[in-house]
Image (cartoon, rainbow, N blue to C red):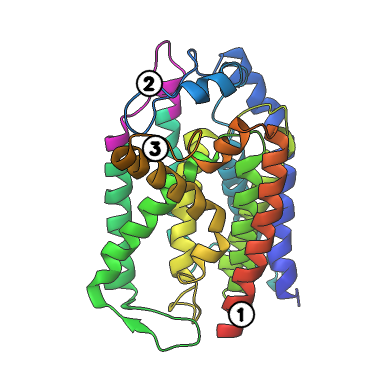
Amino acid sequence: MIPDIVRVLVPATTAFVIGILATPILTHYLYKYRAWKKQPGKTALDGTQASEFYRLHEQNEVRAPRMGGAVVWGSVVLTIIGIAIIARFVPGAEVLKLDFLSRNQTWIPLAALIIGALVGLMDDLMVVRSNGDGMALRLRLFIVVVLSSYIGWWFWYKLGITAVNIPFGLPLEIGWLIIPLFVLVSLAVYASGVIDGIDGLSGGVFASVFASYSIIAFAQNQIDLAAFSAAIVGGLLAFLWFNIPPARFYMSDTGTMGLTLTIAVTAFMTDSLGGGVGISVLPIIGALLVATVASNIMQVLYKRFFGKKLFRIAPLHHHFEAVGWPGYKVAMRYWVLSIVFAFAGVITALVSI
């Protein structure tokens, strides 16, 4: 019999290998069709031009193509399809146990990953056009709200999820409010996607988050979900191989939208549905994502009430660049911190089971 840990590690390894092999092909076409932003620059949260960002990233924005996130979700999808085909045409219990596509654990997060990735891909295709600005923020937020509302309804109506587990305490019964809670969590995590702003930064942070939830799901005997999360880690490591400075490409929306929606789904899947505290530990595991969103909010509020900036530039990782830290130092220190927060979140989750 194949040990459960092998069922988790095989998809991770497979996704990594597929990502490594597929990336040269993908980048060939991305460079051939000049799939990068044609004009550098960024609009600040208050609607003005982000001059500090322009100073820091004037060359980088037009140096490498977008849509690198396709390596992540593409390798995961190919891994799922490949293993499912092998399981179907190579009979035997040992092989069948590797198939981690299941209705009760992986259909919802897989759907979130694919739909989010495709919406993000549409935005990327709009950005890389001449003078392309991409989808309006309001439209992207509206799409996230619609998708998360439906998924939240599915958790409540179809799966009967009406409570949030609290570490070391009794479950918090909220009934149908699980739907707006899922929407709020999805919006918050999606907003953290702007962490994809320095070569190598987002890949390392997202890998730590998904590795954490893979461990939590495994401990809760949600083996298929653990394998799915591990496959995403494998895809992220393949992406990171080519995104280490100087990056060959950027993750952009086709990666961040799919991944952030999947993080929200996975957190809910590992909560009361799996007998754990997946929602409560999300702010710990994703502490750097929280810091990214919080720094943006603080910057806007501080500027509105005091008429000046709190940070040189928001989000926080760009502030560190602005005060003189090289981009690679910011990325590596974020990697270290993301692993530390991952440890803390996993420990909290496991001792609460």
Is tag 1's residue or tag 2's residue first in the polypeptide sequence? Answer: 2
Mark 1–mark 2 Cα distance, whole angstroms, equals 44 Å
Q: Are marks 1 and 2 in contact (CB under 8 Å)?
A: no
Q: Nearer the viewer, mark 1 or mark 3?
A: 1
From the image, tell me which residue sits under label 3: 119
From the image, tell me which residue sits under label 1: 350
For residue 128, above or below residue 102:
above
The magenta span reads 124-139
Q: Is residue 221 visible?
A: no
| Residue 80 pos. (x, y %) | 59, 53
For the residue pair 53 and 149, the one nearer the viewer reads as: 53
| Occupied quadrant, residue 350 | bottom right
Q: Are marks 1 and 3 in contact (CB under 8 Å)?
A: no
Residue 9 horizontal side relative to residue 280, left or right: right
In the picture as drawn, the residue positioned furthest to the top comes out as 130
For the residue pair 207 and 332, the one nearer the viewer reads as: 332
| Residue 271 pos. (x, y %) | 46, 75
In the picture as drawn, the residue positioned furthest to the front comes out as 306
| Residue 281 pos. (x, y %) | 52, 70
| Residue 48 pos. (x, y %) | 35, 24
Is tag 3's residue or tag 2's residue first in the polypeptide sequence? Answer: 3
Describe the element under mark 2 as helix, strand or loop: loop
Describe the element under mark 1 as helix, strand or loop: helix
Q: Nearer the viewer, mark 3 or mark 2?
A: 2
Residue drawn 65% across the image and 33% down it: 199
Residue 96 horizontal side relative to residue 272, left or right: right
Which class describes the residues within 10 Å of circle 3: few (<14), some (14-19), or many (20+)?
Answer: some
From the image, tell me which residue sits under label 2: 133
- Numbered label attached to residue 69: none
Query: Which amino acid is tagged 2?
Result: Asp
